[in-house]
Amino acid sequence: MQLEIHNVKIEYPEGCNIILGQTHFIKSAEDLYEIIVAAVPQARFGIAFTEASGPCLIRTEGNDDDLTRDCITALKAIGAGHVFCILLREAFPITVLNQIKHCPEVCTIYCATANPLQVIVASTLQGWGILGVIDGAPPKGVETDFDRQERHALMRRLGYKR
């Protein structure tokens, strides 16, 4: 059996967050659209989903054509079936992630990030599949008391803690 490992760098617009996951059914893109609109009506977003059987098309939804095109570009680079990509602007993944996890078609969330992203993909004679992701950079140290205070203050400024 021929097996190769590939590193796919995912490019997406600055100021956006990306959610990358695995799902299994043709209605995934539509259901993900409904989840985002219900949770964060002001969000700008694109969604793309790759079918893994039948016509094997990239299905799309969204309310921002540029972000939808960027999702298509990412999924073409990854080349695996049953993968979805969501690009969010004017919203954070934390506002939709639990709803996405509870979507019946969603199998796995690989990442939800605004960091530089690389996807580790394996290829065989059958096709390509995601093994995992490299999200951001490695640790540079351990937080100090000052860093901890800054983290606490940031969460309160963003409205995630009181």
Image (cartoon, grey):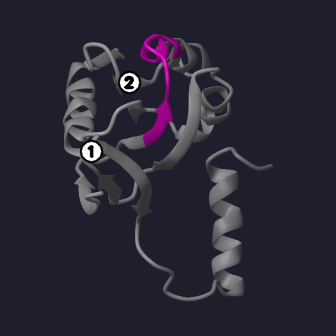
Relative vertical location of residue 162 with respect to residue 150 in this rendering, above or below: above
Q: Magenta stretch: residue 113 in it?
A: no
| Label 1: which secondary element | helix
Q: Quadrant of residue 18?
A: top left
The residue that label 1 is drawn on is 78
Report the front residue among 107 and 102. 107
Residue drawn 25% across the image and 18% down it? 57
Residue sticking out furthest to the front: 1
Residue drawn 25% across the image and 58% down it? 2
Is residue 138 shown left or right of residue 81?
right
The image quadrant where one finds the N terminus is: bottom left
Q: Which mark is residue 44?
A: 2
The answer to which of marks 2 and 1 sits earlier in the sequence is 2
Q: Position of residue 115 (x, y in %)?
A: 39, 58
Range of magenta residues? 19-31
Relative vertical location of residue 48 with respect to residue 76 in this rendering, above or below: above
Is residue 51 shown left or right of residue 43?
left
Q: Quadrant of residue 80?
A: top left
Q: Magenta stretch: residue 27 in it?
A: yes
Q: Position of residue 84 (x, y in %)?
A: 40, 31
Mark 2 belongs to which amino acid? Arg
Answer whether residue 47 is visible to the viewer in this image.
no
Q: Position of residue 157 (x, y in %)?
A: 63, 51
Q: Position of residue 78 (x, y in %)?
A: 26, 44
Mark 1 belongs to which amino acid? Ile
Q: Residues within 10 Å of mark 2 (few under 14, many from 20)?
A: some
